[in-house]
Amino acid sequence: MASKNQVDLVFDNTIRCLAGYDYGVTVFDKQIKEHIDLDKSYFLHFPKNIISLSTSFVQGLFAKIIESIGKNATIERTNILSENDTLKDKVLSNLV
Amino acid sequence: MFIGVIETMRIIFNFICNNLAPIVTFVCMMITIYFARKNNVTNIKSAYFNDIYDRFLFDSIPKYWNLIEFDKELHLIGFEKFTDNLSDFRETALFFKFLDRTFYNDLIKRIDDIDDYINEQANYKCHKDKQSIVLEKINLKLEALYLYIDHYRMK
């Protein structure tokens, strides 16, 4: 686990947009689940090639987090790191 | 025995006559309440539909749909406002989750399907010959969404 409680998400360089509920769940299971402590503030870093997320992807990505700590704690503890500001907005607006 | 039957019938007849007015009043009251509630739900539903039509279906969705195109590198671009708008639409439709769960779930499925399709297509380079097919497919999904909403509104 990174000392900052952060995960640097990795995707194929040719991927620009992430879509699909099931894919969101897969990314959580494979890249996030074992690497962050949900009891404190955590950071998800999206690489710069990612420019867009579909709503269902966001919902799949956070489904198990919300199930585990609740919606309010998820909103409070989630920090999105991305060179693309719209990703942060997209995540937060779809968590509410 | 025959007199006993007549007497029983007379008692029943008197009972009905004496209580008929309150029973009729009660039934009328229940019918009035039922239709008032139904009318009220219809009015609320109608107000919501007007809002959805004005804000999204008539205005922002067609406006932002027009911005979607392919760039010189053959990538789908200009879709961010459109998909953000779909997210807003999704949020506005939350009202229906409490009014008609089946309609809400189906509506969300259709909105997500369009959003996912656009985001998936934006990952690929699309040859010029195929670009119109992608745009047409988005258009067809949108048309189906409009028809679905309109059909439900008319119900």
Image (spheres, coloured by chain):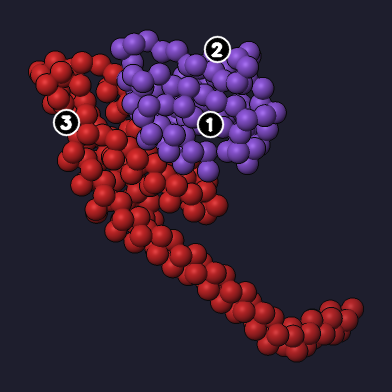
Task: Residue at the far front: name it.
Answer: A3
Q: Quadrant location of the C terminus of chain B?
A: bottom left
SS under mark 2: helix
Tell me whether the residue at label 3 lies in contact with that at label 1, contact meaning CB atoms closer than 8 angstroms. no
**Secondary structure found at label 1:** strand
The chain containing the residue under callout 3 comes to B
- Residue A49 visible? The answer is yes
Which residue lies at the image location 33% right of the left edge and 26% below the top edge? A51
Classify B104 as above or below B69: below
Above or below — where is B20 with respect to A61? below
Q: Nearer the viewer, residue B95 or B123?
A: B123
Q: Residue at x 42, y 44 (%)?
A: B90
Q: Circle 2 sits on which residue? A: A30
Q: Are marks 2 and 3 on the same chain?
A: no
Q: Nearer the viewer, mark 1 or mark 2?
A: 1
Q: Are marks 3 and 1 on the same chain?
A: no
Residue under the point 24% across and 54% down:
B58
**Amino acid, disc 1:** Asn
Q: What letter labels the chain drawn in purple?
A: A
Say what secondary structure mark 3 lies in.
Answer: strand
Under mark 3, the amino acid is: Glu
Quickly name the residue at label 1. A79
Q: Amino acid at mark 2?
A: Lys
- The answer to the question of whether label 1 and label 2 lie on touching residues, with beta carbons closer than 8 A, is no
Rounded to the nearest angstrom, the CA distance separating label 1 from label 2 is 19 Å
Mark 2 → mark 3, Cα distance in angstroms: 34 Å
| Residue linked to disc 3 | B69
Chain B palette colour: red
Quarter of the figure with residue B79: top left
